[in-house]
Amino acid sequence: MIDLHSHTDRSDGTFTPAELIAEARRIELNALSITDHDTFAGYDAALPVAAAAGLNLICGIELATRYQGTSVHLLAYFPVRPPSPQLRQWLDWMLEKRRERNVRLIAKLQSLGVDITLEEVEKMGRTLTGRPHFARVLVEKGYATDLQNAFDRYLDESARAFVQRQEATMEEALERVLASGGVPSLAHPVRVARNNWEKLAAWVEDLAGIGLRAIEVYHSDHSPENVAWYASLAERFGLGITGGSDFHGANKPNISLGTGKHNNLQVPDWIAEKLSALAPSS
């Protein structure tokens, strides 16, 4: 069993890198990828811990991009060589755009009478401060009953305080990942194109033509019907397969590392073994 989609407290998870490695060893994962949002900080911190524990830790990341006017997440894996310094420099730009959004989000919340400061939120965010950290502060200060309520009332795209941040285009993200030797995979396709299957098929075909190498077939949010459909898309368009739980610790308490929601996930070992073959040859 493997898990190629997990988050640490260096982005919007609650487990430290060391705690995540310990959990992976406890449940006897054969391979793990840390795919924090827009940062390698969690992977970098976990690498020596994983090496000491004898765990196969695959370098990964989850990037927020814009495609066809929609926010679409892209997973990227680096099974052959580490991400380039140029890619890491580009991530600094993405983190700056995230902070600019956070400043505007604070202003929007304050305009709605919410007593909140960016300093309060950033204390929880470490390397990266995202909406889950805002949600935790809103719950602690009594503006929401729980994390989901905070998103429903203030933070989701349809909520009254939502602020869009500037994201890289999917085309640019694919180009930069491939140039760094990475394997780009479409993250949780159930959330793409509002799960309009024919629209998703058209998008996957287009993306495969501009550099997409894989699709996340296995995910905690995917039903057996979803899994079968996404696997068929991968076969149709010559793409590889990835999969993972999307573990966030206490920020998504119904999702367990390795096994997803109520044991609905089991990603086979061969998926990690084939990642290297999907990487660019030069």
Image (cartoon, rainbow, N blue to C red):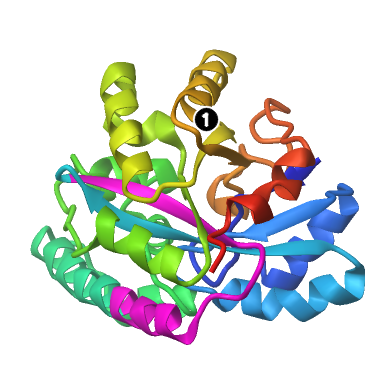
In magenta stretch: residue 119: no
Residue 121: give x, y in percent of width and height. Answer: 37, 73
Quadrant where the image shows the N terminus: top right
Q: Is residue 214 left or right of residue 68?
A: right
The amino acid beneath tag 1 is: Asp
259 versus 87 height, above or below? above
Q: 42 or 211, which lies in front? A: 211
Q: Please give the name of the residue rendered at 53% of the width and 69% of the height, measured from the top-left corner.
A: 282
Q: Please give the name of the residue rendered at 87% of the width and 57% of the height, measured from the top-left corner.
A: 25
To which residue does mark 1 refer?
Answer: 221
Residue 237: give x, y in percent of width and height. Answer: 44, 30
Region in magenta: 70-95
Taking the view exactly as shown, the residue that stands out farthest to the left is 111
133 versus 51 height, above or below? above
Q: 108 or 242, which lies in front? A: 242
Residue 83 position by quadrant:
bottom right
Taking the view exactly as shown, the residue that stands out farthest to the top is 225
